[in-house]
Image (cartoon, rainbow, N blue to C red):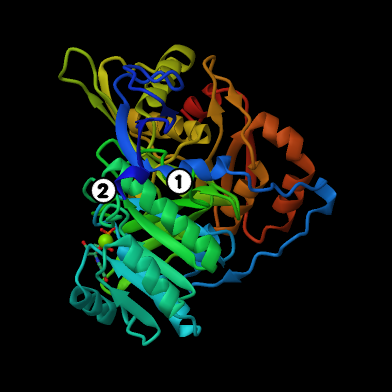
Amino acid sequence: MKNSLKQIFVCNSCGSIHPKWLGKCPDCEAWNSIHEETVQKNQYQQNLSGSKADIKPLPKVEEKLERRLFCGVPELDRVLGGGLVVGSLILLSGDPGIGKSTLLLQALNGLAQRGYKVLYASGEESCTQIKLRAERLGSLHMNILVTNETNILAIIEAAKVTRPEVLVIDSIQTVYNPELPGSPGNVSQVRECTNLILQNAKSQNISTFVIGHVTKEGNIAGPKLLEHLVDTVMHLEGDHSSGYRILRAQKNRFGSTGEIGVFAMQGHGLVDIPNPSSLFLDQNKKGCEGSAVTITMEGTRPILLEVQVLVGKTSFASPRRLATGFDTNRFTILLAVLEKRAGLYLSTQDVYANITGGFKIYETAIDLATAAAVTSSLFNKLLPAKSAYFGEVGLSGEIRMVNHALARIQEAQKLGFEKVFIPAQNYQLEQPHILKLVEKSEHPFFVIPVEHINEIVHKDR
Ligand code: TYD
Ligand code: MG
């Protein structure tokens, strides 16, 4: 076996392969990221052997309709792009304890109920623990096969014998290939095991979920190494304490990325939340000081969220600015814009901002709501009732347009909001649609175009 092994040098940060050790990776320019690894020789020689490539003109390519299985967990099916594609390989990553095993056990139960045979290989928990959890989740089913095997060759052999439709490997850090040196979880083991799992998924047409823990820096062990091998990368995140979990597709060969699924962790497992907006807003229908509602897009889905801001006199030499749920740097810039362009005196004030429900927002459309919330907290004044805000704030205080304006407005209308403040440019572009929506609304509904941050800050004061 030994002579079929080969030493290569792999960059831990970008995954590129080099013939010798280097201090700095020439591809991604990371320092000290190159490590020696042992791999099976034949794998890298396969490509060089004289097998014939199948070449044809693009229009002549046969269209194979991908077959999909439904897991019976609607939010998961949606993030997958409308069900689980047969023979696809999916990586599910997330912090330890966030609910990855729970989610997949529920999905396996859904599949088992539909008559599919599934195999759950867990190196993390004993079969007894899995059974206890399954009882709690109501997921005991004869079609769910379990094993504690961690030898990847044995797992693949078992899959060949039992022929399940779906295989789950929990987790990639606990499985190992006995033909390679190194303990489970090291970069070469993770890579080689994933390669074997991939080959098995494609050749046997077994849809496979691989669970991966995230390291401290937020990378899946062997960063990027796995991501390009698999068809879909999903990330489960959320605030442990809030009980909400968000499933995001970061890469999906069979659907759109940016889709999210929202769950609540309860005593009997993860429960789908088909309408997250209403959930995050329930507590605050009347509104309170320093709180503004924004409409953010998650994939194709508008979600209403609350931005809360607390402004208070500082007791430090330089005032503190802290944002949870969105970018602190961007928040600091926004405060500078409010100070310079709208004349708010903030340099002696600490400003803290938070998105309720443990949600994270990565888009700039939240700016306008944050600005409104800062104003409200600073002047101890309630914002207009049942109002929502979206728009990007530019450095000169101008409100810049954002995408999917109409979808956002529609969502606010649907949830009973009465006023939506939007970028003036978006208003111009969508005017006919907006007017139609306003006309059809059964409750009073106003869409208010905003050109400059001053119009929000100095309104009604
Ligand atoms: P788990 O799926 O084991 O997390 P992971 O596989 O990502 O490490 O989830 C563990 C947490 O979920 C655990 O702290 C308890 C909680 N939990 C519930 O709150 N309700 C439940 O029904 C289950 C099964 C778990
Ligand atoms: Mg687990």
Residue 418 visible in the current orientation? yes
Residue occupying the far bottom of the picture: 142
Task: Identify residue for label 1.
Answer: 42
Q: Front-most of 113 and 207?
A: 207
Q: Residue at x 26, y 82 (%)?
A: 135
Q: Residue at x 80, y 48 (%)?
A: 56
Hey, what amino acid is under mark 1?
Asn
Q: Front-most of 267 and 197?
A: 197
Image location (x, y in percent) of residue 201: 49, 62
270 shown above or below 41: below
Q: Secondary structure at mark 1?
A: helix
Hey, what amino acid is under mark 2?
Gly
Label 1, label 2: how many angstroms apart (C-alpha)? Answer: 22 Å
Task: Identify residue for label 2.
Answer: 185
Q: Secondary structure at mark 2?
A: loop
Would you call the spot at circle 2 few (<14 residues within 10 Å), some (14-19), or many (20 or more)?
A: some
Would you call the spot at circle 1 few (<14 residues within 10 Å), some (14-19), or many (20 or more)?
A: few
Image location (x, y in percent) of residue 191: 37, 46
Residue 113, quarter of picture:
bottom left
